[in-house]
């Protein structure tokens, strides 16, 4: 097998690492999930569970699980049920709802489920909140998409207060709370970590800042979403300040699609396996035929160039390409704490697992500085090699002269 192209050459990382002070130090996956509708859904869900277990073994920090109810491709309806199963087969990876669509839930029931999971996972659960992504989901529930953000804001306020142990009485257009309080307290004193989804509009940033909770930027790979990162962060900082909170970049998470292999040519060839599924999904949602969707090769070129609707611009290449993309994101955003890989059926299940392995092997250490001590030790040994070798040679010669052991 050929060696992957690491950050400094074809044999993997070599030499001192140029670490960006604004780059992420935590890494995970955002598992909506997306699955082709010609596959076995039972096996697809089982492979998702196996993937999270694999990521735990590789040392990834987080996995966020989505909630969707229609359109066929995103097959997890309850991230809480998935997290409960995944938690029993993992040890350290943190598991988040990515995200719960708050207009679909009564705040007390949702907060209760999350707090139960907090205890079942022994403090590893996180709550991601959003208004709901698919209009088809809202339509089936009789929810006006124009009301979803306002509904989400009302529900988030109630959920935050409940998780903080408050007794809540509140009335909204779709729920009522009367002297409501959760029976359990969080597993850890600091409570459950929360984050709000944000795309292009600043509404998510404003809500996250209002409550002093994390920001989850789902559209960082989309050109429009990338352009909005700084304005969304500014809206978050402003909202935090207005409500007495401190905006901390370490709580900011960016989501991007990547697929890695030992070479760019191999990564692109592997991506041709899954990219037709994504094209069909986009066409199904939009009702239009994508002009670049005639061949898998054309679709990969489009995806890595101008990008796809929904999925943005992908990095399909080597660990060196992934590092360059993340550093560019860090520079464009001004800095963030966690990079989440948007999990997609880009390659075969085996190729996708290998992509995560390459990311963990070569990309993560570049940003965490895991090898800085090793590099410094080798440089020190090299700089003093003449002195060390001379001392060793002198010791051997002295031993030989005395007739003792060499």
Image (spheres, rainbow, N blue to C red):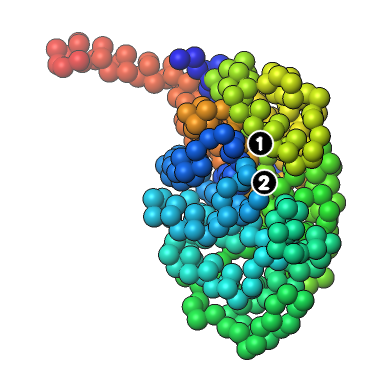
Q: Is residue 181 above or below residue 340?
A: below
Residue at 16% x, 17% y is: 405
Residue at 32% x, 18% y is: 392
- Secondary structure beneath dot 1 equals loop
Q: Is residue 17 above or below residue 396?
A: below
Question: What residue is pinned by disc 2?
Answer: 71
Q: Is residue 241 among the parts visible in the rendering? A: no
Side of 156 relative to 47 (left or right):
right
- Image position, residue 55 (x, y; %): 47, 42
Q: Is residue 386 above or below residue 175?
A: above
State the quadrant of the C terminus.
top left
Q: Which mark is residue 166?
A: none
Question: What residue is pinned by disc 1?
Answer: 257
State the quadrant of the N terminus.
top left
Q: Nearer the viewer, residue 257 or 149?
A: 149
- Image position, residue 96 (x, y; %): 56, 56
Foreground mark, 1 or 2, reads 2
């Amino acid at each position: 097998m050929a060696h992957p192209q690491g950050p400094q050459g074809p044999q993997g990382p070599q030499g001192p690492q140029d670490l960006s002070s604004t780059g992420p130090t935590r890494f995970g996956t955002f598992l909506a999930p997306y699955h082709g509708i010609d596959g076995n859904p039972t096996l697809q869900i089982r492979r998702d569970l196996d993937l999270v277990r694999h990521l735990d073994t590789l040392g990834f920090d987080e996995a966020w699980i989505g909630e969707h109810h229609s359109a066929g491709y995103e097959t997890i309806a309850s991230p809480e049920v998935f997290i409960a199963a995944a938690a029993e087969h993992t040890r350290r990876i943190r598991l988040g709802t990515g995200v719960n669509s708050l207009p679909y839930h009564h705040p007390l029931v949702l907060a209760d489920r999350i707090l139960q999971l907090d205890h079942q996972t022994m403090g590893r659960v996180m709550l991601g909140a959003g208004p709901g992504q698919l209009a088809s989901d809202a339509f089936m529930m009789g929810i006006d998409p124009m009301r979803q953000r306002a509904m989400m804001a009302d529900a988030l306020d109630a959920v935050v207060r409940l998780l903080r142990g408050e007794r809540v009485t509140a009335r909204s257009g779709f729920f009522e709370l009367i002297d409501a309080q959760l029976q359990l307290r969080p597993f850890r004193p600091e409570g459950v970590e929360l984050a709000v989804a944000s795309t292009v509009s600043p509404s998510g940033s404003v809500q996250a800042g209002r409550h002093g909770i994390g920001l989850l930027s789902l559209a960082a790979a989309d050109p429009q979403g990338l352009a909005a990162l700084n304005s969304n962060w500014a809206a978050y900082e402003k909202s935090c300040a207005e409500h007495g909170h401190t905006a901390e970049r370490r709580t900011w998470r960016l989501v991007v699609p990547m697929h890695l292999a030992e070479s760019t040519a191999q990564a692109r060839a592997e991506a041709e396996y899954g990219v037709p599924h994504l094209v069909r999904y986009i066409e199904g949602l939009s009702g239009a035929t994508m002009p670049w969707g005639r061949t898998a090769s054309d679709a990969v070129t489009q995806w890595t160039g101008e990008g796809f609707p929904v999925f943005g611009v992908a990095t399909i290449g080597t660990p060196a390409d992934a590092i360059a993309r993340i550093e560019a994101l860090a520079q464009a955003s001004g800095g963030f704490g966690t990079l989440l890989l948007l999990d997609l059926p880009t390659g075969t299940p085996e190729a996708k697992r290998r992509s995560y392995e390459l990311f963990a092997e070569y990309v993560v250490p570049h940003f965490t500085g895991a090898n800085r001590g090793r590099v410094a030790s080798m440089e020190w040994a090299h700089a003093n090699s003449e002195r060390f070798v001379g001392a060793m040679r002198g010791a051997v010669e002295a031993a030989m002269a005395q007739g003792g052991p060499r």
